[in-house]
Image (cartoon, rainbow, N blue to C red):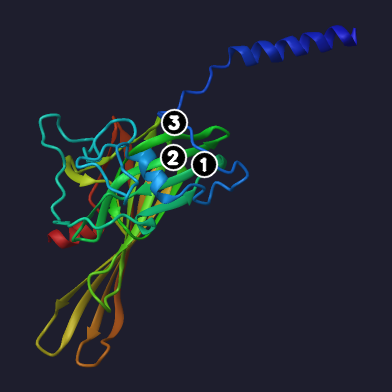
Amino acid sequence: MRSVLTSALSLMVLTTASCRPPPDPPICAEYVEHDPAASADTRVLPFDVWYTILVPGTARRPALELPESPRECSGRPVAVRLSGQQDSAPPYSHTAAPIPRESITEKDITFSPAPDGKLLIWARVEYYADQTAIGPVALVQLVERGVEIRGIGTLLAPHKRANLYLEPFADGDSLLVASGDICPSEGDICRKETHFLPLVGQRFIQAGVIVDGEFEGPAKVAAHERVDVSDDVDGWIRREEVDRTLRVTETELSIAETVTILKCDARVTPPECSEYKTTQHSRVMTWTDGYFTTTSGVWERMRAE
């Protein structure tokens, strides 16, 4: 009886395994030699090899040289087309001026660990005067025969102290959270800015945001902003600050905001400030039809008054 039951259970396991759909093939694959014992949070391959994988047509010798019009490994241009725009709208145009290209080095590529032993890579191909950069971003799986790309897209974001990570997101997908610093000038406080791109299937979606029914631009959030407003002629100023925190769950993306108003005596250095008023608010960003929708935040409403 036991042998019959064991045989039946074994048959059920085999049947279940045979009915399970095979995993999707990688969106790109490259068979290169690497150390299979290497950890996925290391570079594993030289940076110029990564560029040839992620940006086909890149030449490695005598010096690394990118194609004139770079495309990522799936064949799509390294460019931004935001979801949520009307089909008749022109592609999203970055307003900052590009910085003339210099030679590509290992400083132009960012590596971060990802779940299940995978690797996130952002290989920058163009830099802009507003301290942002653009380039293919990829979710990489190291396999015995080489490299499989399990997610690909274009990321336009701040590049200083860039950090990438994945969060579980709606319907079993993932969300790429990419943050970096923007430092206005020497001595000023840097501002952290976070961009988020849903990974749907094997494509990082350049998500647009619709705020109060109006298309606003890319899905991003600034961690901190500050405005000083002259309050009177006696040297006092009204300082308005907002701090934002991104919260990601498997069912919801939200932004928690704390707006603080201070009264500051600018006659002394540094100004002496005392808290006048604090307001807290949270707004949900709903992922629907391939883009985010939300309402304007407390800070934006205050700026509009």
Q: Secondary structure at mark 2?
A: strand
Helix, strand or loop at label 1? It is loop
In the figure, is residue 131 to the left or right of 49? left
**Residue type at the position of mark 2:** Leu
User: Gap between marks 2 and 1, in whole Å?
Assistant: 7 Å
Coordinates of residue 70 in the picture (x, y in percent)? 24, 40
Answer yes or no: do the residues labelled 2 and 1 have beta carbons within 8 Å? yes
Question: Is the Cβ of the residue at disc 1 closer than 8 Å to that at disc 3?
Answer: no
Position above or below: 114 against 232? above
Read off the residue under disc 3. Answer: 29
Seen in the picture, residue 62 relative to 33 is either above or below; the reply is below
Q: x, y (%) of residue 50?
A: 41, 44
Residue drawn at point x = 48 percent, y = 32 percent: 31
Q: Nearer the viewer, residue 265 or 75?
A: 75
Q: CA distance from mark 2 to mark 3?
A: 12 Å
Residue shown at 58% from the left, 48% from the top: 39
- The answer to whether residue 54 is left or right of residue 125 is right
Left of 111 or right of it: where is 294?
Answer: left
**Which numbered dot is residue 118?**
1
What number is the disc on residue 139? 2
